[in-house]
Amino acid sequence: MKFQNRKLQTLSGTWKMRPQIYDDSCYMEQFQLADSYLVEVPGSVLSALCDTGAIGEQYQDPYYRDNEYALRELFWQDYWFERDFEVGQKLLEAQEIELVCFGLDTLTEIYMNGELLAKTDNMHRTWRFSVKEMLKAGTNHIQIRFLSTLRYIQNYQAQEHKEIHCDASGAISGNQYLRKAHSMFGWDWGAQLPDAGIFREIRLEAYSVARLESVQYTQCHRADGSVLLTVEPEIVCLSKYQATEIPYFVNVILRDPNGVVIAEGVETSVFTIEKPQLWWANGLGGQPLYTVETELLVNGNCVQRRVDSIGLRTFTVSREKDQWGEEFAFMINGVKFFAMGADYIPEDCIYSRITPERIEYLVKSAVRANYNCIRVWGGGYYPSDTFYNLCDRYGLIVWQDLMYACNAYDLTEAFEENIVAETLDNVKRLRHHACLGLWCGNNELESAWDHWGNFLEQTPYIKADYIKQFEYVLPKAVREADKNTFYWPSSPSSGGCLDNPDDENRGDTHYWEVWHGQKPFSDYQNHFFRFCSEFGFQSFPSYKTVYTYTNEEDRNIFSQVMESHQKNDAANGKMLYYLSENFRYPKDFEALLYVTQVLQAVAVKSGVEHWRRNRGRCMGALYWQMNDNWSVASWSSIDYYGRWKALHYRAKEFYASVTGSLVRIADNDSSVSNGGEHFSAAAAWVANETAQAVSVNVSLSLKTLDLQTIREASKEILVPAFTSVLAVEEDFSAWVQRQPRIMVPPSQKRVERSNTNTLQTKKLYAKKDVFVEAVFTYTDGRVQVESETLLPYKYMDLPKCSVEYTVCAVQQQSGSTGYCIELVSNVYAAFVELDFDDADVIFSDNYFNITKKESKYVYFYQEDILNGEFQNAEDVKQRLRVRTLWDSYTERRED
C-alpha cells in the first residue's frame, strides 16, 4: 500500500466579507456599508473596510482624530467571510483532510459547503477540524461567521456569586469573558477597536496514517562539556491504524550551525554532542543555532518533515537566598546576568498589519538598544513564529506571559477546558525556542487580588477561581507540554499563594510610584528591587506622528482629540506636572512634545542606572513599554510609526554591556534653603555585564556652561566581570555656592590650602552656571560622556546655544554608504535633537548633551533611513533640524 506525502493547500488570499446588520444598529447609517467587500486573508473587518477606503475617506485611517469611537460601533454587528476554492481528486485520496485555522478572531461559526462544521471561541488557539467527508472534487465553498464580541459581552450571564465588577483601565467592561486579546477592547494606552477576522493563515492539510504534531527537545549538559540531546516527537495516528499494522517511524537529522550533518538516526532520539557551540543572550556571546530535521516515515517513505532551529544552552531563574532575601536572577549556561529590555505589546490594533517586516524592525531596534530580554505582556496575544525565530537569531530572552492581564476570570468548566487547550497549543509551538526564558501565568493579577481595591470587592468565589486557574490548572498544563522551562505564577510575584506579591526583597516587582504616584525621579534610588519587570514614564510621540492624527485646531494637549489619544486618566496633566518640576514651560506645541520625550528618557534612565549600580541585589530592569499599537501618547520608547523616541536612544547607552553612569549626591546640610533636593557632589560608576574584566579611564569634572573646567579628577580602574563599581566620587561644595538661588557677588572668595599648603583663592560658582561631566574612555576606543546639572534645568541659566554643523558622505567597510554629521557648540548644549520634517532615520546618537568644544560626530547609513531619501550631503544639511533644550523655551532671533 502506498501512502502520499502530507499535502498543504492554503485558503489564504482573496475572500469576500459581508456585514450582517442587526435591526437595533442605529449607529451604522454613517458608514453606508455595501453588501460585500473584498478582503485579503490574513485580514479582518478593519483591514477590509479601512485599508481599501471602502467606508469613505473620513474613516480610512482608524487612528485619525476620534475615528476610534465611530469605528468601534462596527463591532456590534456580525460579519461573514467566505470564498470558493478548488479541491483536486489527488487531495481527496488522502485518508484524512483537516481544515487548520491558525488565527480566528474570535467567536465563529464555520460552514463548509453550506453545512455547519464547527464553532470557535478563542483567538489564541490553533483549530483543527476534519473536513474530508464534507469536501468534493471541484469547487467548494467555505463561510465563517464572526459573531459580535460586544453583544456576547453584553448578553453574558454569570452564575450566582460569579458576577465580576472590575475592569482593566481603559478597557471595555466584560472583556475577560472572552479568549480574545484584552487590549483589543482598549487599555490605558490602546484604542477600543475589537476587530474580527482571520488574522493568520488558514489552510487544508491532507495526510494518511499519521501526522507529526510537535517535537519536544530536552538537553542534558554534562560536566565534561558535552550535551545529551533528546528528541521526542509527538505523532497523531488515525484511529483506524495501529503502529503494528502500518509501519511508521521517525528519522532525525541533526545539523551543526554551519549546516553540516553531525548525527542521524532512525528510531534514535538521543544524541551526544561532544563540543557544543553554546547559545547566549545578546551581549554575552554568540547565538549559534543547530538544525533538527524530523521526518515521519510510513512504509519507509518520508511523508512529512519538520525543521526546527534550537540553541544549546541551559536557562533558569535563580532564587537563591542571600543577605537581602531571595534573588531573582536569570542564569544562562551557569552564568547569572542582569536582564535589560522592555515590555512588548502587539504592534497594531489591526493584527493583519503585523507583518514579518514590522516584527523584524522592532526586534532589530531592541538589539540596537542593547536589550538582552523582552517581555511579552499578557494582555495582548502570542506573537507569530517570526517573532521567536528573530529572538533566537539575535539573542533576546523572552519572558512569556500567558495571555491574562488585570482582570478577574470566571473559571467555568468550558472556560477551563478552553484555556488548557490554548496553553497546550502555544507551549508546544514555542517550547523549542532558544530564546524562551520563562512562562509567567499572568500580568498583575496576584498583586491585584492582594491589594487592589476593585478586586477586594469581588466575591470569594471569583478569588478562589484565581487560585485554581493560576496555581493549579495553568501550571499543570504548562508542565504537561514543557517540563524544561521555568514557570512563574504572576508578575509581579514573590512566588505565589498571594504571599506579599510586591515584596521588594523577593521575586519581581512592578514599580509605579514614579509616574502614577507622582514621586520624583530620585525616588528610584530608595528602592533595591530584586528584578523590576515594569516601571515607566509617558511621553508624546514625535510631532510628525501627532500630525497624522490631528488637525491644526487639535494641537493643544488638552483638546478633545489629543485627550482621546491619551488613554491614561489625567496623564497629559501629569506630564505637565513633571515638566514643571524639571524644565521651563515650552514655547510652543512642538517644543512641548520634545520636552516630554526628554523627561521620559531622564526618568527611565535614572531608574535603570540605579539598579545597574546595585547589580547583584537587583538583577533586571525591563521598562514599560517598548512599542505602541496605534498613534498615541504612551510609555513607549518607539512610537507606532517606528520612530525612536529619546528614551530608545538613551537605552542604547544605559543598556550597553559596559556602560558608565553619573549620579548626583544630595546635600546633607539642613541649612540649604528653597526646598527640594540640592546637590554639590557626584559619583561616576561603571557597570560591566560581560565575562571579561574591563579597563576604563574615568574622569569627573565640574565645568562652567561655557565649557571651562573648574575641577577635574580622573582614575584608571579595572572593572571585574559581571560587576558594577564606583570609579570616582567628588565633592564640589568647595567650588559652588551652598544656596543655589541666592546670588553671591562675584568678588566673594574662599581661602583654601592646597596639597602644598600654599594659599589659593577660589571663585564660588552659582549652581545655575555649572554642570558635572563624567567621561568614560574604554580600551576599544569608545568614549561615553554623561552630564548632570546640580539644579533642575528650569533653574539653570543656559546660555544662548547655536550648534553649528556640517555634513559629509561616508562609507563603511561593508560598502554601506551614509552621512556623518559633525556638530560643534561653544557652550553647554542640552538634549540635542536631530530630525527631518520629511524623512525618518535612525541616528547613531540623538538627544545627547554637548559638553566639550571638540566636535561631536553622528552617523546614519542607507539602512537607517526609514522614510524619505537624500540626494547628497548638502541635501542632508539643508533639511536637518537641530533643537536643544534652550530652543524649547526661547525664541531664536538673528543677531
Image (cartoon, helix red, strand yellow):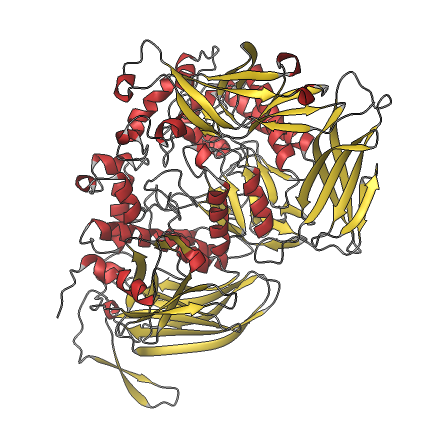
**Is any part of residue 522 visible from this angle?**
no
Q: Residue furthest right?
A: 244
The structure residue drawn at horizontal position 37% and vertical position 28%, both measured from the top left corner, is: 193
Return the residue nearer the eye: 4 or 826.
Answer: 4
Residue 561 lies in quadrant: top left
Q: Is residue 591 above or below residue 147?
A: below
105 is higher (above) or lower (below) than 354:
above
| Spot occupied by residue 392 in the image (x, y as percentages of width and height) | 60, 47
Is residue 169 shown above or below 551? above
Work out whether 535 lies above or below 38: below
**Which quarter of the figure is the C terminus placed in?**
bottom left
Task: Report the front residue among 75 and 401.
Answer: 75
Total marks in image = 0
Residue 731, x across and y down, in percent? 37, 72
> At 27% from the left edge and 34% from the top edge, which residue is drawn?
564
Q: Residue 894, position in %: x, y?
A: 13, 67
- Where's the N terminus, which quadrant? top right
- Determine if residue 559 is in view: yes
Query: Residue 470: x percent and y percent?
Result: 57, 28
Foreground: 385 or 516? Answer: 385
Residue 639 position by quadrant: top left
Q: Is residue 730 left or right of residue 622?
A: left
**In this image, 151 relative to 253: left or right?**
left
